[in-house]
Image: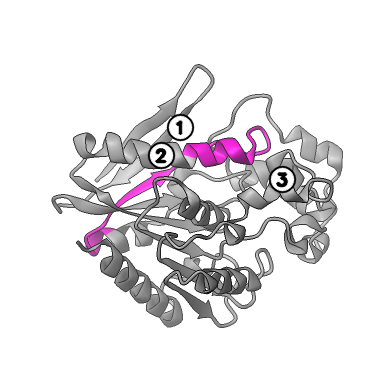
Amino acid sequence: MKKTVIYKNNDCFSIKADFYGNSNHNAPVIVYIHGGGLVWGTREEISEEMIKLYNDNGFAVFSIDYRLAPETKLPEILEDVQDALQWLKSEGPQEFSIDPKRIAVVGSSAGGFLALCTGSFTHKPRAIISFYGYGDIIGKWATNPSSFYLQKDNVPKELARRLISNQVITEASIDQRFLYYVYARQQGVWIQEITGINPIMHKDALLKFCPKQNITSDYPPTLLLHGTKDEDVPYEQSVFMRGALIKEKVETRLITIPNGEHVFDKDFDNPVIQSAFKQVIEFLQYHLTE
């Protein structure tokens, strides 16, 4: 059962989320954050297989939109994620049969990065799962021209600029915005575009947006999943995040997908992926059970 709500709005924009419930009373909730390099994506990108997997195992799902870059910068995007969690805790119990004290955040790629950022929020989720996310936005992988995207046809600056709106954007398809992302990665300007901060000139100003740099002892238990052949977000990003969590004695695990590429979870029926999802469910059941 799907129900769409507006969790945040003002005169310039409204931001939606889709709730997928089941028959469970006071169900724990998975907040799902889509990927798209922070420049495209929509709450509807969560697959039917994923929704069914979570619902069948007793979890409700709350898939959120958020304002997209470069029209909106990263600090405001993180505010949207915070507001979505706050709305779910304050308004969610009146709207749905959920337990607001049992919330986990799951994200993919850029959504995995945002999920990892929630570990530093004042009001943290009970657990975090990052699918091929990243904990560092000041490393060379993010701030230098990407060798992978440089292999693609060059995207001219003029074309990329035409894909930017003069209004706030909360939903965009990959067809609408992918070339802008390719341009930003080819030129090594992606982080500056999404944050408004030059990572070479003002590296220190970006540290507060790097989950790897902001881990404390009360950071939630975290499960990381990453493929070794990921050419968009390097596998090492999850390795380094795991190491930083272990250093602070935070419960964490990394599920490695051998030869897995970016968005490996689309190969849902692959036995290796099925095994990974089984571990995802076990992790969630362990940490969201009272």
Q: Nearer the viewer, mark 2 or mark 3?
A: 3
Q: Depth-wise, is mark 2 or mark 1 nearer the camera?
A: 2
The residue to which callout 3 is attached is 205
- Tell me if label 2 and label 1 are in contact, CB under 8 Å: yes
Residue 56 lies in the magenta-colored region: yes
* Count of all numbered marks drawn on residues in the image: 3
Q: Amino acid at mark 2?
A: Ala
- Residue at left offset 32%, top offset 66%: 284
Q: Tell me if 150 is positioned left or right of 240 in this view.
A: right
For residue 261, what is the image quadrant? bottom right
Is residue 12 visible to the viewer in this orientation of the structure?
yes
User: Which numbered disc flags the more N-terminal residue, 2 or 1?
Assistant: 1
Residue at image location 41% in from the left, 52% down from the top = 32
Q: In this image, 147 relative to 277: left or right?
A: right
Marks 2 and 1, how far apart in space? 9 Å
Q: Position of residue 265 (x, y in %)?
A: 48, 68
Residue 15 circle label: 1
On the picture, is 36 further left or further right than 84?
right
User: Dividing the image into 4 quarters, which one contains the C terminus?
Assistant: bottom left
Quick check: 11 above or below 144?
above
The picture places residue 252, in percent across and down from the top left corner, at 45, 72
Residue 60 x %, y %? 27, 52
- Distance from disc 2 to disc 3, alpha carbons, whole Å, reads 25 Å
Residue at image point 66% right, 32% down: 71
For badge 1, the amino acid type reads Ile
Front in this rendered view, residue 105 or 248: 248
Coloring basis for residues = one colour
Q: Which residues are magenta?
A: 55-80
Determine the residue positioned at 42% across, 34% down: 16
